Image: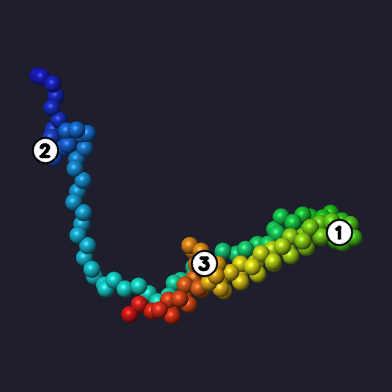
Amino acid sequence: MSAMTPRFTVGVNKANGRRPCREPVPFQEILPLKLKDSVSGKGDRTSEVACLQDMAVMLACFKKHDFNQALCSKEIGAFQTCYTNFMIDHTKRKNMESTMAGTKSKLPYRTLNKILKKYPSA
């Protein structure tokens, strides 16, 4: 018997030995293609925890020194400065979201809903 020949040679591309791709399924419009006038805010439900590391260090110091605040003044000060910086950044972000001056590629869902209510897709 001579060299073995492959069984399925019909439809096989001889250059790379692969079968050709199947033809794509034609699109059938079942429902009308219409956008909603609102966006869900599910992606924005991340809870921001402010200064978790500093809070853990402060509470560990309290536990170590039987909740004596005088001995943990350095940790309390570090936590307070971290929290004030967090609140300043948080208010800046809220102001940027409320105004469209800080337009960016990803708008918050509340701003998108306001725009979509202004200009509904009829």
Residue type at mark 3 is Thr
Corner quadrant of residue 34? bottom left
Which residue is tagged 3? 103
Q: Residues within 10 Å of mark 3 (few under 14, many from 20)?
A: few
In the rendered image, residue 72, in percent from the top left (x then y), is placed at: 85, 57
Gap between marks 3 and 1 measured at Cα: 42 Å
Asked if labels 1 and 3 touch by Cβ distance under 8 angstroms, the answer is no
Classify mark 1: residues with Cα within 10 Å, few (<14), some (14-19) or many (20+).
Answer: few
On the image, which quarter does residue 32 sit in?
Answer: bottom left
Q: Quadrant of the C terminus?
A: bottom left
* Kind of residue indicated by mark 2: Val
Element on which disc 3 rests = loop
Q: Residues within 10 Å of mark 2 (few under 14, many from 20)?
A: few
Dot 3 or dot 1, earlier in sequence: 1
Image mark for residue 10: 2
Q: Pick the residue in front: 45 or 5.
A: 45
Percent x, y for residue 74? Answer: 84, 56
Q: Which mark is residue 73?
A: 1
Q: Earlier in the sequence, mark 1 or mark 2?
A: 2
Whichever of labels 2 and 3 marks the residue nearer the N terminus, that label is 2
Q: Which x, y percent locates residue 12?
A: 16, 37
**Residue drawn at point x = 48 percent, y = 77 percent:** 114
Residue 66 visible to the viewer = no
Using the numbered discs, state the Cα–Cα distance from disc 1 to disc 2 in whole angstroms: 82 Å
The quadrant in which the N terminus is found is top left
